[in-house]
Amino acid sequence: MMNFGLFMVLSSLVMFFCGVWSFTFYHKHLLNALLSLEFMMLGVFWMLILQMSNVGNEVYLGLFFLTLAVCEGALGLSLLVLVVRSHGNDYFKSFNLVEC
């Protein structure tokens, strides 16, 4: 029988590597890239919380990390809205740095 803590750590590693896999193979759209980055951050956050629960009751580092992840997500969504308004879609191949 597997230990519950080991199962939780393995599930967070699977979440992280699924995010890396989806970022690698589904990178045609900006929205897919942002969602996979958020999924990777969720896996890292879960692993951080699991490790901090083993050390003690230190939740401030986890809250700080979660705050940074939320700010990163909000910035990504605002860039997505800006790109869709200016280019009409979110394909990476439609971005041209020469026209900017």
Image (cartoon, rainbow, N blue to C red):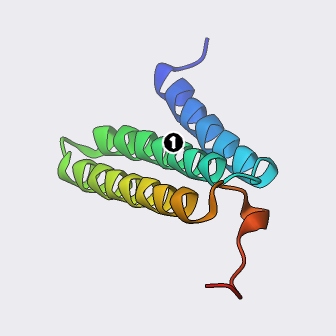
**Residue at image point 79% right, 65% down:** 93
Extreme residue in the top direction: 1
Helix or strand or loop: what does disc 1 sit on?
Answer: helix
Q: Position of residue 17 (x, y in %)?
A: 68, 44
Residue at left offset 55%, top offset 65% = 86
Question: Is residue 4 positioned above or below 14 on the image?
Answer: above
**Residue 4 as seen in the image, left or right of residue 16:** left
Above or below, 29 relative to 96: above
Quarter occupied by the C terminus: bottom right
Residue 44 placed where, x, y %? 48, 48
Mark 1 crowd level (few <14, some 14–19, many ≥20, 10 Å Cα): many
**Image quadrant occupied by the N terminus:** top right
Residue positioned 72% across, 78% down in the render: 96
User: What is the number of callouts on the image?
Assistant: 1
Q: Which residue is mark 1?
A: 43
Position of residue 64 in the picture relative to residue 46 (left or right)? left
Which percent across, then down, holds residue 31? 60, 48
Which x, y percent locates residue 94? Answer: 75, 66
User: Which of the pair 94/69 is nearer the observer?
Assistant: 94
Closer to the camera in the image, 81 or 63 = 81
Residue in view at x 18 percent, y 51 percent: 60
Question: From the viewer's perspective, is residue 15 above or below residue 28?
Answer: above
* 30 and 26: which is toward the camera: 30
Amino acid type, callout 1: Gly
The residue sitting at the bottom extreme is 98
Front one among 45 and 56: 45
Q: Is residue 18 left or right of residue 63?
A: right
